[in-house]
Amino acid sequence: MYHYMKGIVTLQAANYIVLEVNNIGYSIFVSNPFQFELNKESKVYLYNHIREDENCLYGFKTEEEKELFLRLLGVKGVGPKLIMPMLATGSVNGIIDAIDRENILYLKKFPKVGEKVARQIILDLKGKLTSLGDTPSIGGFDELVSVLESLGYKTQDIKKILPNIDGTLEIESQVKEALKLLLK
């Protein structure tokens, strides 16, 4: 399973990009290909969708977007081809807010989402997505946040100390600095 890839975006099409990694071009379906800069290195979070008749890579700019995709994928009757247009036209926080407030009209504005699908999404996900919109992904501290969460620290506490961490330090030094601040 892939978590992410770093490479050069060599092509932007209507619904996918080609990411060149070690001289191999990967076609990756994305919600908005133009959020990735052409001929620049990009980090793309990935989901490998395998079915008996397809093997596709779906890519995301942020981990929050990927996590929302995975949660929506778990809803009965919802597949990647329905989710990608939702992510293209709606924001992660907007979709989460619509689900938590049971805003069926907001969800129905997306292509292929009718009343029945909107109700199913709300039924399955209401109240289960609030942590996604609050994930602290501040300026390259993703690895630090992951380490601290694995040590059992709460997201809210981590988010408070991140502005006091020197981002130029190695990850080990960042963890030491963060632990000192968290133990105060």
Image (spheres, grey):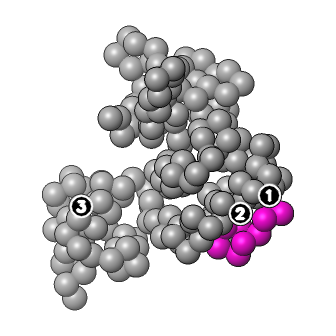
Q: Which residue is mark 3?
A: 147
Mark 2 burial class by Cα count in 10 Å: few <14, some 14-19, many 20+: some
Secondary structure of residue under mark 3: helix
Is 10 drawn above or below residue 29 in the view shown?
Answer: above
Q: Earlier in the sequence, mark 1 or mark 3?
A: 1
In this view, the residue farthest toward the bottom is: 184
In this view, the mark in front (2 or 3): 2
Mark 3 burial class by Cα count in 10 Å: few <14, some 14-19, many 20+: some
In this view, the mark in front (1 or 3): 1
Q: Which residue is mark 1?
A: 115
Q: In the image shown, does 170 or 34 lie closer to the viewer?
A: 34
Residue type, numbered disc 3:
Val
Q: Earlier in the sequence, mark 2 or mark 3?
A: 2
Residue type, numbered disc 1:
Glu
Q: Quadrant of residue 15?
A: top right
Magenta portion: prevailing SS class = helix
In this view, the residue farthest toward the top is: 23
Rendered-image quadrant of the C terminus: bottom left
Can I make out residue 126 in this image?
A: yes
**Left or right: 85 in relation to 136:** right
Q: Which residue is mark 2?
A: 119
Highlighted range, magenta: 98-105
Question: Decide: marks 1, 2 in contact (CB < 8 A)?
Answer: yes
**Distance (Cα) linking label 2 and label 3:** 36 Å
Secondary structure of residue under mark 1: helix
Is 176 drawn above or below residue 118 in the view shown?
Answer: below
